[in-house]
Image (cartoon, helix red, strand yellow):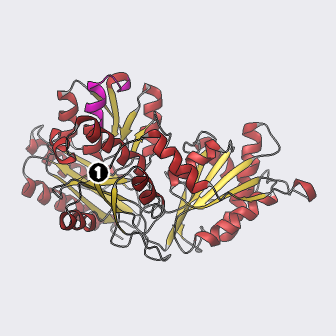
Amino acid sequence: MTRLFGTDGIRGVANEEPLTPDLAFRVGRELVATLQVEHGTDRVRVVIGRDTRRSGPLLESALVGGLLSAGADCYAVGVLPTPGIAYLTRRLEAQGGIVLSASHNPFEDNGIKLFSAEGTKFPDAWEDEIERRLAGRDQAPRARGAQVGELVAYSRAESDYVEFLCRCFPLDLSRFTVALDCAHGATYRVAPRVFRRLGARVLTTGARPDGTNINAGVGALHPEVLQRKVRASGASVGFAFDGDGDRLISVDGTGAIRDGDYALAIAGRHFAARGRLKGNVIVTTVMANLGLDQALQAAGIRIVKTQVGDRYVHEEMQKLGANVGGEQSGHLLFLDHAPAGDGILSALVLLSVAVETGEPFAALAGCLRKFPQVLLNVVVKSKPPIESLAGLGERAAAFEKEMNGNGRILLRYSGTEPLARVMIEGPDDARIRAMAEELAGLIRARIGG
């Protein structure tokens, strides 16, 4: 069978193959069997939650049915950000967690994302085991009578998560006006509660989900909406989340958009100066701007880069013992506080720096000067090795020679969408844009969808 699990779980159009209720039911059953073996116990507990997509309850009911029929106790937490579900998986001492979300994708899509007992991404080997079971071998036994799992509607989930965030950063935000864009997604209740609890005056947009408007022109992928709100309101700072709440893009008080590179530069330099940056290292990905390298190196901080994906950042952080890492896209990891990316927690980290230094966010962002960067996405019908596309490698090499070490080119496929990505950085914005357009055109001509 075609592999179901990608870099971020199972994802696709809801109620179409492969992401059907039938598959969700079977994933629930085989997840239980896998957890029973890996944890050496007959009775397992699983936490399950979702974002605001209309298809969430459909897939949730099927998954819950599978979990219960295989004998797992299921704690249903309702609509909650992905990091909140990861937190509750640990807090409720569950053997696994499930999030129904397609993150920043449009509402028609959905996904099944699995967490380990530690609240981290599910191990690849365990995903492989579930796929092996789904293929028809060693299927989970059916629970009967008293063996059937118990369904618990865990009504304290949102309050527990709010308490956790406020304990991590018991800040006095009474001097701040904070604008929030919740993407009509999973943060729409929790995020305003957290910032109001800490004393901030809160303005919201993207906080009226209707099941079909998640990520629709709002949120972390469309920060210009928040940018306009910050400028119109005179807010101190703005924070935009994606649909499931694990990503953060910020807007400073001047209305400038600040992505994950800025967050890493601000937090990393602040922590390093106070002896709180473990290993004096920050882990990011190959997408990070060259300006981040310079900002960190100027402060004596080592930077380590991985392939794109927060799971790869997390794995490298664990190897190095690092406590700060993340992606330009806004997936940020602060492992002293949480094992998964958390948009709200990341916003609190940035505000804690502003509180400790007395500096506005706009001034803090001055530590990073970005190189011009162009990122183009090309819809593709297949994903052959990108170096095998005729003429592409030779043209990219010629452009790199032209930049003479003052820029870089990155060609790769998306791990979750049918896209090829062309990213170029260099000193001349117009020239790198022309280069990117040419390379994108070559890809489109070879494998364009």
Disc 1 crowd rating (10 Å Cα; few below 14, some 14-19, many 20+) is many
**271 drawn magenta:** yes
Q: Give whichever of 118, 160 is nearer the camera.
A: 160
Considering every residue shown, the one lying at the far right of the view is: 145
The quadrant the C terminus occupies is bottom left
Q: Amino acid at mark 1?
A: Leu
Left or right side of 128 for 307: left
Quick one: SS at disc 1?
Answer: strand
**268 drawn magenta:** yes
Left or right side of 185 for 263: left
In x, y percent, where is residue 74?
A: 73, 55
Identify the residue at image location x=32%, y=24%.
280
In x, y percent, where is residue 240?
A: 34, 59
Specify whether residue 445 is in view. Answer: yes
In x, y percent, where is residue 198?
A: 40, 49
Q: Against 282, is 140 above or below?
A: below
Q: Against 305, is 385 above or below?
A: below
The quadrant the N terminus occupies is bottom right
Identify the residue at image location x=53%, y=66%.
110
Magenta span: 267-278
Identify the residue at image location x=42%, y=26%.
320
Specify whether residue 288 is in view. Answer: no
Q: Give whichever of 291, 344 is nearer the camera.
A: 344
Left or right side of 372 for 160: right
Left or right side of 449 for 227: left
In x, y percent, where is residue 62?
A: 70, 67
Q: Give whichever of 395, 210 is nearer the camera.
A: 210
State whether the magenta stretch is mostly helix, strand or loop. helix
- What residue is pinned by disc 1? 411
